[in-house]
Image (tube, rainbow, N blue to C red):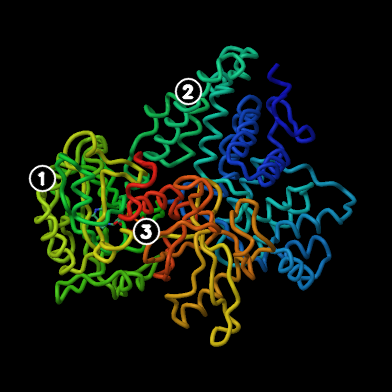
Amino acid sequence: NPSKPKYHPINDACWSKGQEVPYLALAKTLEAIEATSARLKMVEILSNYFRSVIALTPEDLLPSIYLCLNKLAPAYHSLELGIAETYLMKAVARCTGRTLAQLRSAAQRGGDLGRVAQDARAGQRTMFAAPPLRVRKVFAALREIAALAGHDSVNKKIGKIQTLYVACRHSEARYLIRSLEGKLRVGLAEQSVLQALALACANTPPQAFAPGAPDPGPAQLDVASTMTPDAFKALVDELALTIKTTYCECPNYDLMVPVLLQHGVRALPDHCRLTPGIPLKPMLAHPSRGVHEVFTRFEKEQFTCEFKYDGERAQIHVPGDEAPRFADAAVFSRNQENNTSKYPDILRRLPALLKDSVTSCVLDCEAVAYDTEKKQILPFQVLSTRKRKDASEDQIKVQVCVFVFDLLYLNGKALVREPLEVRRQLLRDNFQEVEGEWKFAEGGDCSDEESVQRLLDAAVRASCEGLMLKALRGPRARYDIARRSHNWLKLKKDYLEGVGDTVDAVVLGAYRGRGKRAGLFGGFLLACREDDRYQSLCKIGTGFSDDDLKTLTDTLQQHVIDGPRNYYMYDASHAPDVWLAAASVWEVRCADLSLSPAHRAAIGLVDPERGISLRFPRFVRVREDKSPEQATSAEQLARMYLAQDQVKNSAKHLDHDD
Ligand code: ATP
């Protein structure tokens, strides 16, 4: 009987068919997820919640997914929360009679304003209980709050927050306040949410509950009970792959969820395709350490070498039907953020790039700071001084040249499954270079080590980071959306003899500085990610200038928390003076990777008991463009460790892409 949800684990937050989902059901689900550190358990808990929503109130699946991900819209809509703590405290203070000083000191002690808000709300009696919060209304209110701008918007925001807050029960206040802060802190990665959605759809197929579908029988509520465990696992894997692949090509839940609810997961690829205007997740490269290794990796395959430009990735979309609509063109970042207003100059120059044969396209490019007089590439640091938003063209000081290296969509057709050789030819046939503005990535197809070495030297002379080596023909030469693929290898000039690449690590804690560094943070505990967990990787204290340390000490203050999260894996001997929420990602260089009895990075992947650690780590820079979810993974570290000459023959091989 679908009106009696049995599988939702939280009895006091049940609801009946057709009713709006209580926010309490989601809050309790998040509470259960926060209390576990096992990824599979998290996925199972969340999938049970999704199943209830699918069977009882499918309209609430979309807001539920967004709320679990702490997002309000696709990344490129730039609709984000992240309300300053002071405003949240003001709202809580006004509703509870606590003073700002009381709230501030409680938040500093505990490091979590969400819990402070929950405790403050629990200790409060109200004469008239506000009607219970509903998922859909909370989501709509959060979107409204995020969109408020202009005169008096701060007060309006605080007012709306108060209205929500006074209606909170139990842990609702904790998650509401954390959502408003923009930090849900339950350890749920997006991939886990997608996995939970796949598990839910396998067990309770949404199309069986769509309006107009025949009455679903009990089997549709619990498909797992009608299959062998192996067959059910295969079904979940298939649906997870479809959901994840669709999400890569069309990262927009507003489009995916209605299709999934009406027609089921298998209909997604037909309805949600690569479309100009919707940025896709880019293909990424694996590191390599030398020209020789490249030939081993590509064996007899044909590959091409392109200069690896050191700028900012720019995915350029031009929609159109009969003709390109330049007014709707957009530039997206590596993380699908809308960078259009950062690059008015790129947009103005677009028409010159497209030949008359082009009606719509998606181009993969690198925008690089450029000295137009000397006709020279400038370092990445120069580009990073450019205004990030709403740049007006006459005030732009840093000029860019855009190096186009791939064509993913042309005239209504996705090209991601075509081999690079075909995509490159179409690029050259349909687009044209413009001096100092648009250039095709330089390079050449190589068949011997000497020519790769010559190109590498040329790339270095041209101020590039090194080379990108890409499979040219056959199935390996497809564009692997959202994957760090072995079909693209990067060969960086700095690391040829070292470990092949820098590591992007997450900062989990800080040690107080002494002597010259007194009053500042002087050292930090870094970690890699492993699914939803963070495993300690090394302590770092070098590579920082005095100014770096001042800025980092300041910016990290906002991430201070009361103690380690249950998804931080570390040895007690490394416990830092101050714990930090996993938020900042730093690029770090090291001499090599070694096994460590105390660090936990990639534990179990190359050694059953020891983790991997970085030797002589040095800070390179903050990776503003990477979130903790995009930090170097345990598996990537394991590969880098195994690729080192001295360990090459001694450990098991990892050879599939991540
Ligand atoms: P990093 O930039 O530190 O190397 P990453 O994780 O950002 O790491 P990688 O996969 O390592 O990305 O390297 C690919 C990046 O190099 C792309 O995201 C792109 O911005 C840049 N790039 C520069 N030139 C090229 C090129 N010819 N082909 C592909 N990517 C290029």
First reached walking from the N terminus: tag 3 or tag 1: 3
The residue beneath circle 3 is 339
Give the label on residue 71, or none.
Answer: none
Q: Quadrant of the N terminus?
A: top right
Mark 3: few/some/many CA within 10 Å (<14, 14-19, 20+): many
Q: Which circle, 1 or 2, is nearer the viewer?
A: 2
Q: Residue at the spot x=21%, y=35% of the render?
A: 418
* Secondary structure state at the residue bearing disc 2: helix
Task: Tell me which amino acid carries mark 2.
Answer: Ala
Task: Tell me which amino acid carries mark 1.
Answer: Asp
Picture quarter with ligand 1: bottom left
In the rendered image, residue 69, in percent from the top left (x then y), is placed at 56, 46
The residue beneath circle 1 is 429
The residue beneath circle 2 is 234
Drawn side of residue 522 relative to residue 324, left or right: right
Taking the image as drawn, is residue 153 in sight?
A: no
Q: Give the quarter of the image for residue 154.
A: bottom right
First reached walking from the N terminus: tag 3 or tag 2: 2
Task: Tell me which amino acid carries mark 3.
Answer: Asn
Q: Which circle, 3 or 2, is nearer the viewer?
A: 2
In the rendered image, residue 476, in percent from the top left (x then y), is placed at 24, 37
Q: Residue at the spot x=62%, y=16% of the render?
A: 225
In the rendered image, residue 471, in percent from the top left (x then y), is placed at 20, 43
Mark 1: few/some/many CA within 10 Å (<14, 14-19, 20+): few
* Secondary structure state at the residue bearing disc 3: loop
In the rendered image, residue 279, in percent from the top left (x then y), is placed at 36, 46
Please say if the residues under marks 1 and 2 sit with CB atoms less than 8 Å apart: no
